[in-house]
Image: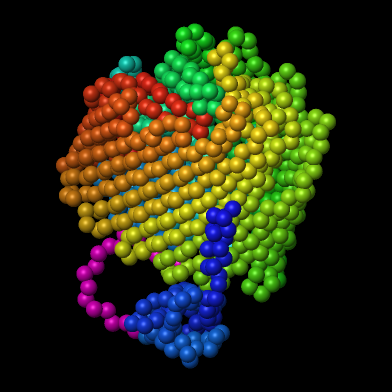
Amino acid sequence: MKRLLLYLIILVSLTGNAQTFTGRVIDKSGKPLVSASVVAKGDSGFVVAFARAGQDGNFSLTIPQGKEAKSIEFLMMGFGKVVIPLKDYKNGQTIKMQEQAIALKEVKVTPLRIREQGDTLTYSVAGFMQKQDRSIADVIAKMPGLEVLPSGTIRYQGKAINKFYIEGMDLLGGKYAMASENLSADKVKSVQVYENHQPVKVLKDIKFSEQAALNLVLKDEAKNVWQGVIDVATGYGDDWLRDARWLEMVFGRKKQSISMMKANNTGKDIEHEVADLTQFDKTAPTEDGILENISLGAPSLDARRSKFNDTYIAATNWLFKTKKDDDLKLQVTGLYDRSRQQQNRQTIYLDADSAVIAEEQSARSTRSEWQAELLYKANRDNHYLSNTLKGYIDFNKSEGLSMLNGHLMPQWVEPRKRYVVDNLELINKLKNGQSYSITSLFSYSYLPGMLLLTNDSTQQITQQMLYWNAYAYYQHSIKQLKVTWQAGFETKTQWLTLNNKDRYSEYLPYVEPSISYREGAWSISLNGRLSWLMRQYQKQNSQNFLAEPRLFIRYSLTSKLDISGSYSYRWTPSDITTITRQAYYTDYLSRQKGSGEFENTTGQTANIGLGYRNVMTGMFCRLTSGYSNLRDAVIYESQLVNNVYIRQATDFRQDRETFSLSGSLGKSIFWAKLSITLNGSYSWTNYDLLINHSLARQHTRNGRASLRFSLKPTRWLSIEEESAYHYSHQSMTNALQSWNHELKVFILPGKWQIEWTNELYHSNDKSVSTNYFSDLSISYRAKTFEAGLLCSNLFGTRNYRRHYTTDYTDIIALNQLRPREFLARIFFNV
């Protein structure tokens, strides 16, 4: 609690005793000068505060506590500079600037790789693209401040983007990897970042966002024309290999479309291209399944080293603009995948008297999943209407064999899921600046599952959930404050059918007032939900009054440096899987039973972040610290009985707290197109573990540091390198340290490309071997044609041993890897 108070004191101190000056900047005709710079300077011309004039020419300049300013300067391209001593400045006065021609000296012009205009950064693709880059995602990964994760998620300054636009249109929603990883980089002119992006125009300056959006600006020859990609590769390893894709796309002012089909069994992960990578749109939740396909876990290597897959995906995406410039969008995606896994594993259950299970497992998993989404959206300055209808169905299953402590055990599971979701939101802005909104979020989930147990019996389990949240709000202004009054009703009912049918229900009427303030360098948002929670489980009833406040503050110290902080308190009711008295299996050897009573957790989260970006020097960095705690979580008593890991809810409750520190630094250097990215994070968690019927305080420590750079020292040579260090420690185990290094060398004479990839893994654990992999490819690349040969895993490394820990387990696993493989590839881009 002391640490939490410290966070709040630091956060509150941001607002203390600062001096604020306001005014308006106009030209000689009285028109506001939008984005005019307002700079407070101290001794020796040192900048102590910065602001920009808004759309109406008004500005608010805040001089931080402890800083002393001598003058205020007003600057605008094409206008003469105005300097006013601070002692002579009258708060609220109007500054009139005179037009002035500027004589430019002869200069040597070099292309700007990054430009800034207001809240928009524009990255030149030509400035960062290297000859080996194929998709636009390859180029984005080299842009400072931006990062592309293996999952396809794109982050800016450490935060995931909330929208991905192509020519200002949201064709793909959260499934933007279909474009970022398949759209050729040479068709994109620039990548724009919209900072602090609020996608709903009506909510601009009312609800703030810390997330950024990305927009691809295409070259003229890539607009309003149908274009396609055909890519085929075949070869041999242990079996016949294939990798094929077909894409067709068009990007026009009134219509956009991407349709594709892919097939792959080379270990390449293409499944994430049809996954939803954003979680920021309002949507009703769907039920999480108790059962899952068999997953033996992947080693910390490039995923294609250990993935034995046979994957097919199909997708079509269409976006039409109506006569009123509204959006009508249809998305249909399908995925079929058969994967096989093989692993030897020893698991020590730290919370079950350090009991040991040894498994030799082989499994085949099948995923057959289909999704569809239909969207209509009108997004205007005074009106917003959006309705999204989604549907999902799968036919997933897994089967396998396990040698469990010397006993042969067959495995089989069918974790099926179906759901339908409808999200409706209406916002109208009135003539007096006030607005109102009506929202309805609805979902129904149905999950019928079957699982084979160790005693040859079958568990049949069915989960269902019905969810609805309807609310309305009214928003108005009180001077500089935006005040919103929201009221709604939320309900959720879950059914769990095993031996009997359990039902759990929640009914939640609530009000949620909020206040937001944005002026000059300040953005402040405060809101809190007040609710009355009524719960029912079998014949039990419970009622709770809840108050959950949230606070967000951001202050721009200068145009390049900002500080932000947030705090939230949450009271979370536990769902039926924690409450039910029925014992259920989550896999063939793990069984769990709830308390039979109403459960809940409480928690607090506080974060402080410092961000810096300098477009002229190409430097972006972010430093974030955080604290969170979780109270009253159920603690389970665990034991191993006849090779079954049994977890039973107890009367003990857990207090858990986590501290974290993370930072990132991206730097772009014009020489050799050098881009450098440094990332680091460290977290420590304290929690309780029930051992021998008494609570034992435990801790985990996790750290990671990475360095990534790319450069092109000559026209025919490019180098990309990434090294990462991992650290983990659990109280009852030894500290583990590991290093991953990946070096790619590209030799690029003329239209030829030779790529040599090297990957090295090593650890401080003597039982874990050092692994080295090497791949080599050669290809001939023309503008619309490419052909090449690839040999992967040149040295034929077939096994990988790793050691890792979780809160409750210590695991040593031996994974089978893909063999040496050869591929021949031909590619057409038209």
Report the side of 300 relative to 331 (left or right): left
Question: Quarter of the image holding residue 724?
Answer: top left
408 on left or right of 612: right
Q: Is residue 780 visible?
A: no
Dominant secondary structure of the magenta stretch?
Answer: loop
Q: Is residue 291 magenta?
A: no
Visual colour scheme: rainbow
Residue 182: x and y in percent read 40, 40
Quarter of image, res 325: bottom right
Horizontal side, residue 450 vs residue 825: left or right: right
Rendered location of residue 574, percent (x, y): 68, 37
Can you give x and y, in whole percent of width and height, for residue 380 in the image? 61, 60
Q: Which residue occupies the extreme right position in the image?
A: 539
Taking 140 as reference, is 63 above or below it? below
Residue at x 36%, y 78% (from the top left corner): 46
Query: Does the segment drawn in magenta span residue 118?
Result: yes
In the image, residue 105 above or below residue 356? below
Asked whether residue 581 is in view, the answer is yes
Q: Residue at x 66, y 29 (%)?
A: 649
Quadrant (top left, top right, bottom left, bottom right) of the C terminus: top left
Q: How many marks?
A: 0
Q: Is residue 283 above or below residue 306?
A: below
| Residue 178: percent from left, percent from top | 45, 40
Q: Residue drawn at (73%, 38%), measured in percent from left and top?
A: 492
At 45% from the left and 16% from the top, the residue drawn is: 358
Q: Which residues are magenta?
A: 101-119
Closest to the observer: 454 or 498? Answer: 454
Name the foreground residue: 828 vs 673. 673
